[in-house]
Image (cartoon, rainbow, N blue to C red):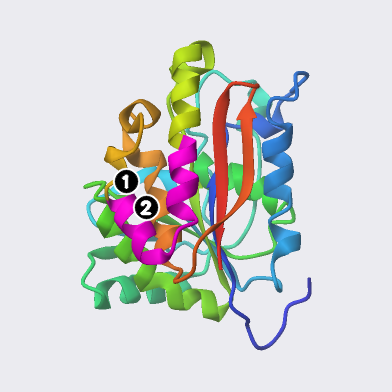
């Protein structure tokens, strides 16, 4: 892709970002192979080189929304018990303070509380999947927090507020996981719960937007919802991505991780 002077509308995504620095460790069983391939396929499928990336991280919660406003954010190695080399990973993409200010203003105009954060670096929900998807680190990146209320409607509204950025060449990425219950890796009963929830999620996301948004607001009514997400922070980045689009979402990634847990990823045009 080449940068063009006139941006075209970019898609938004909801990605499953994997476990810690999983893509940068030996994986003899191929557990993360398909997910890594999915992340690498994001960039080639874009209509042009993005102006910037805006990544909503499941690992950052604030009172109101916050957007990273640093010129050169550092990295937060916010995972534990991994090999030493995973604490030396780099991804030196630039920030974009002017774009961060614009995003905050868009949220504010929509009646949402938002602020600039010039201190926090990028957590692993940001830099790990983006290092796979955009390894050259040559596209500016912003991180955005969840509102700690974890209100799904609030996050759908945030997506609607930020949707015009897509027409300015910004790729919006919700970074979380379609299923987030670590016990399921060793419990076949819980793994089946992930399959049931995943089927509901596919139906919801690929529906017409009005129906989709009602379903996502009421996600706790889904089959095995609280087993799939004992706490919903890894699901809420989906609400922001979905909120940016007035079209049904499409499924761009689906597998049973390690042959057991159903995981999915979505694109919104």
The answer for how far apart the CA atoms under marks 2 and 1 are is 5 Å
Residue corresponding to mark 1: 61
Disc 2 element: strand
* Residue 192 highlighted magenta (yes or no): no
Vertical relation: 105 (above or below) 192: below
**Name of the residue lying farthest toward the bottom:** 6
Question: Residue 212: horizontal and vertical position, in percent?
Answer: 38, 57
User: Viewed as shown, does residue 215 lie left or right of 177?
Assistant: left
In terms of image quadrants, where is residue 162?
A: bottom left
Which mark identifies residue 145? 2
Residues at badges 2 and 1 in contact (C-beta under 8 Å)? Answer: yes
Q: How many marks?
A: 2
Closer-to-camera residue (101/7)? 7
Residue 98 shows in this picture: no
Determine whether the residue tagged by mark 1 lies in a helix, strand or loop: strand
* Direction from residue 261 to residue 26 in the image, left or right: right
Residue 123: give x, y in percent of width and height: 49, 43
């Amino acid at each position: 892709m080449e940068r063009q002077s006139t941006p075209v509308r970019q898609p938004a995504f909801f990605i499953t970002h994997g476990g810690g620095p999983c893509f940068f460790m030996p994986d003899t069983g191929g557990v993360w192979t398909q997910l890594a391939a999915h992340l690498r396929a994001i960039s080639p499928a874009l209509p042009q080189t993005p102006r910037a990336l805006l990544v909503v991280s499941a690992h950052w919660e604030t009172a109101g929304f916050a957007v990273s406003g640093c010129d050169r954010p550092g990295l937060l190695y916010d995972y534990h018990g991994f090999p030493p080399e995973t604490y030396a990973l780099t991804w030196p993409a630039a920030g974009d303070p002017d774009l961060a200010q614009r995003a905050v203003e868009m949220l504010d105009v929509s009646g949402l509380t938002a602020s600039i954060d010039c201190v926090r670096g990028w957590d692993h929900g940001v830099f790990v999947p983006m290092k796979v998807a955009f390894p050259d680190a040559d596209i500016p990146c912003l991180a955005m927090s969840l509102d700690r209320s974890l209100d799904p409607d609030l996050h759908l509204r945030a997506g609607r507020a930020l949707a015009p950025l897509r027409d300015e060449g910004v790729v919006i990425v919700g970074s979380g996981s379609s299923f987030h219950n670590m016990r399921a890796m060793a419990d076949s009963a819980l793994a089946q719960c992930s399959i049931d929830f995943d089927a509901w999620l596919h139906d919801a996301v690929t529906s017409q937007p009005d129906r989709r948004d009602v379903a996502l607001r009421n996600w706790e009514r889904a089959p095995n919802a609280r087993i799939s997400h004992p706490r919903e922070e890894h699901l809420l980045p989906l609400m922001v991505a979905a909120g940016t689009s007035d079209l049904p979402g499409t499924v761009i990634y689906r597998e049973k991780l390690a042959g057991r847990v159903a995981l999915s990823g979505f694109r919104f045009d």
